[in-house]
Image (tube, coloured by chain):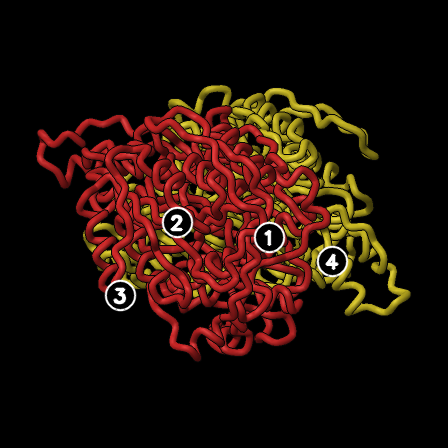
Chain colours: A red, B yellow
């Protein structure tokens, strides 16, 4: 990858706002500050499971330095620092005395980019603070708390000229990128309908808070998954599904989501799991989980396509992303027997036997995305099946070039906004909810940016 | 099957109403008219493809006579008469001079039951006339024209004490009845979510009107499918999907549909198919098909379950019923690779390997429905995979016993009403539409009647 760093040249004065324990000074960044020959300076906020993975991804990139790490868990922090030190001989500065220590990091360090892997409710506030501090932000998938904070994210990006990218690894899945490639080459004809979702039996993790990356002191009632399932009902993890689908449908690139309807089933799975797997005096017994076991969402798009989204982490089932991409010429499906992630099926009019499915394998080979071709040749690094590395690499490359990241702030805001929008529809008994146009009309003229070449 | 005919004992005075070419006299049926030792007297309206199949099914039953046949196509009529004559040595009386000749048949013949296999828009009017004439009606699947006519059907049934059964063969599918059996035995725990639909590439048939059983003089623009696709957009063939699902969910038997939301994609497939497969001067060129290519519907049930229904006969794809029955203990899926009708997959908590699908075959054997066990032992007659015979046999048995048929008038009205309800939701941009309670509250106390034993 070539260094092509046109350093941000716009930041005059940005102030971190909002409640906090640190008083934030105004600060300025020199216009046109030259970075062409220097490293991309990265800060990390939250280095539990996912953040830890990101450290490893970043360390594989050239001309990138992790200069600071923030985590309120001392164990996470020191582990993260040690990993970086081991590889680079330079120990990143540590932050993490309290929940707002990350702001101290943003002010004190001269960062180009910040990777945020904290509990869901922190993603957008931290991304906003990051952009206000003059850096690009990258955030993990997960629900927004409100539609308003999604607007705040977009407004901050537009005000600062900086960007937030959601690190949606499923967009980088080999099969999803091959399908996107096929869509762009017209194999599917005109797209009509997509299905997608996140169907993953996580009952144990949700109920006990284990393996959930909770950065809260108490396991149960932690922020990441447990508390969200106690307090909310809606599609809280839509991005794995909607990410790749948005790219196929050219959302924000000539198309947009119009309205959305969600329905949730009754809530049974989590309570039942606790009853059958935990001691009778476990604090997770008898919790009144608000979250319905299965949440279904339908979205209508401006160009006449429909999307069905499924969210099910509360019932016993094999993992699935329930993928379906369907057009006037072909249909691709990944579910059931075909839900093994590399075992999907396809039917292409004129090519496939009449009324029959074919295994996707040969199509995968034929339509392999250029980025994946390159990364397979170079020996791609694993982690969420390769997508984990590619998303971080794509983000850093955008920072280096000072261009919008391959998944931009509008995508991040829209995908994360599905959660509060679906909550609203469910609360209103399945009423249709208008989808906000976070681009303010720019969707009509913006061009695709994701996966255009083999570069990032 | 034992004869146990408690002949209708209620009909005092019924009048066929509505516009028609025949002036209908009032008529009465003797109260308690004894039929215990006589045949069930059947009339047929419409003996094209499906009606022809029904004749063959009826002829295999004991103590049943097809005494009259009505069809406005002379070829259909005489073929139907000849088949019956060949088997029974008695030629049924023929009707069919004009569209309302069936009413002449209803008045002149002393019928116990009428089987209706005409274009969709005639199903409910003919069933109403049939009940008013003192007989049970059986109708093919297909869309109702309006919600009002569904109410008229229910009201007529309640006024006459007679019944209409929708001949939904998918309810009698081996796998669906085995799954129903498993649901009733608690294998799925408490049900949460179902998916179902009718996904069948019928573009050629719809566009040309061929093989569509159209009883209209002109092929194109015929009533059955072509015209429906020109004039309407909604789920017009919901019953294959919703029938078996309704039984699993105990709809009208302690549960009910609450509200419904539908979305349709743009309409592309039919026009495109005509352009690529027909002469440029073919009358099907350039038609403005109103029907969206893929129609998706979500339904919320009173007991907290959700249903997703798919209707897609306008795009290239392998056949599928997109079945999914999901509960707190198990999930069954029939789609994609598993959509070959006898190749579905299942995951049962505690029995299946963790996070893995199993083939449904062994479960099918273990939970085979008693009716199917019996019919397989007796050598079931084919036709829509056996379900075609079982539905007619079940209907005739209910007539013989003068009891509500296994799929009753409320089911018929509700399942057929999905079409106009989904049309309404689509027309309103995806707004939620309340589902009428055709039972007027009786759903709270009515008991299941479908597939209870191996008798019918």
Which dot marks residue A193? Answer: 1
Q: Which residue is mark 3?
A: A87
Q: Residue at x 24, y 39 (%)?
A: A72
Instruction: Using the image, tell me which numbered label, if any, was put on residue B270.
Output: 4
In this rendering, position of residue A20 left or right of residue B239: left
Task: Please name the residue shown 49% across and 32% down the image.
Answer: A15
* Residues beneath discs 4 and 2 located on the same chain: no
Q: CA distance from mark 3 to mark 1?
A: 47 Å
Crowdedness of circle 3 by 10 Å Cα count: few (<14), some, many (20+)? few
The local secondary structure at tag 3 comes to: helix
Q: Please say whether residue B373 is visible from this viewpoint.
A: no
Residue at 30% across / 38% down in the picture? A225
* Badges 2 and 1, same chain: yes
Q: Between label 1 and label 4, give the one nearer the viewer.
A: 1
Q: Residues within 10 Å of mark 2 (few under 14, many from 20)?
A: many
> Which comes before the other along the chain, label 2 or label 1?
2
> Earlier along the polypeptide chain: callout 2 or callout 3?
3
Q: Chain of mark 3?
A: A
**2 and 3 marks on the same chain:** yes
Residue bearing mark 2: A115
């Amino acid at each position: 990858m070539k260094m092509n760093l046109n350093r941000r040249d716009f930041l005059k004065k940005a102030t971190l706002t909002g409640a906090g324990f640190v008083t934030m000074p105004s600060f300025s960044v020199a216009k046109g500050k030259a970075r062409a020959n220097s490293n991309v300076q990265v800060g990390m906020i939250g280095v539990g499971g996912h953040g830890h993975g990101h450290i490893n991804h970043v360390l594989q990139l050239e001309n990138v330095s992790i200069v600071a790490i923030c985590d309120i868990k001392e164990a996470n922090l020191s582990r993260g620092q040690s990993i970086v030190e081991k590889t680079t001989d330079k120990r990143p500065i540590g932050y993490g005395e309290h929940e707002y220590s990350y702001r101290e990091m943003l002010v004190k360090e001269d960062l180009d980019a910040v990777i945020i892997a904290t509990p869901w409710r922190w993603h957008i506030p931290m991304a906003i603070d990051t952009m206000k501090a003059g850096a690009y932000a990258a955030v993990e998938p997960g629900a927004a708390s409100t539609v308003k904070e999604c607007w705040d994210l977009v407004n901050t990006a537009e005000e600062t000229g900086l960007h937030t990218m959601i690190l949606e690894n499923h967009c980088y899945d080999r099969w999803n990128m091959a399908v996107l490639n096929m869509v762009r080459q017209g194999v599917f004809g005109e797209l009509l309908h997509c299905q997608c979702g996140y169907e993953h039996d996580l009952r144990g993790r949700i109920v006990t808070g284990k393996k959930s990356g909770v950065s809260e002191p108490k396991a149960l009632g932690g922020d990441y998954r447990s508390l969200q399932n106690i307090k909310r009902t809606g599609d809280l993890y839509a991005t794995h599904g909607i990410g790749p689908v948005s790219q196929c449908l050219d959302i924000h690139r000539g198309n947009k989501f119009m309205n959305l309807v969600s329905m949730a089933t009754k809530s049974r799975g989590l309570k039942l799991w606790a009853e059958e797997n935990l001691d009778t005096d476990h604090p997770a017994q008898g919790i009144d989980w608000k979250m319905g076991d299965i949440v279904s969402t339908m979205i209508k798009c401006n160009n006449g396509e429909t999307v069905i989204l499924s969210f099910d982490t509360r019932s016993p089932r094999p993992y699935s992303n329930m993928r379906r991409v369907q057009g006037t010429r072909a249909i691709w499906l990944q579910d059931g027997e075909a839900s093994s992630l590399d075992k999907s099926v396809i039917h292409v009019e004129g090519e496939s036997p009449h009324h029959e499915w074919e295994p996707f394998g040969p199509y995968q080979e034929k339509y392999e995305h250029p980025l994946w071709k390159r990364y397979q040749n170079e020996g791609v690094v694993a982690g969420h099946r390769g997508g984990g590395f590619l998303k971080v690499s794509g983000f850093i490359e955008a920072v280096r070039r000072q261009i919008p990241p391959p998944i931009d702030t509008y995508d991040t805001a829209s995908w994360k906004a599905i959660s509060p929008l679906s909550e609203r529809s469910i609360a209103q008994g399945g009423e249709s909810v208008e989808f906000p146009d976070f681009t303010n009309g720019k969707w009509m003229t913006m061009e695709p940016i994701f996966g255009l070449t083999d570069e990032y």
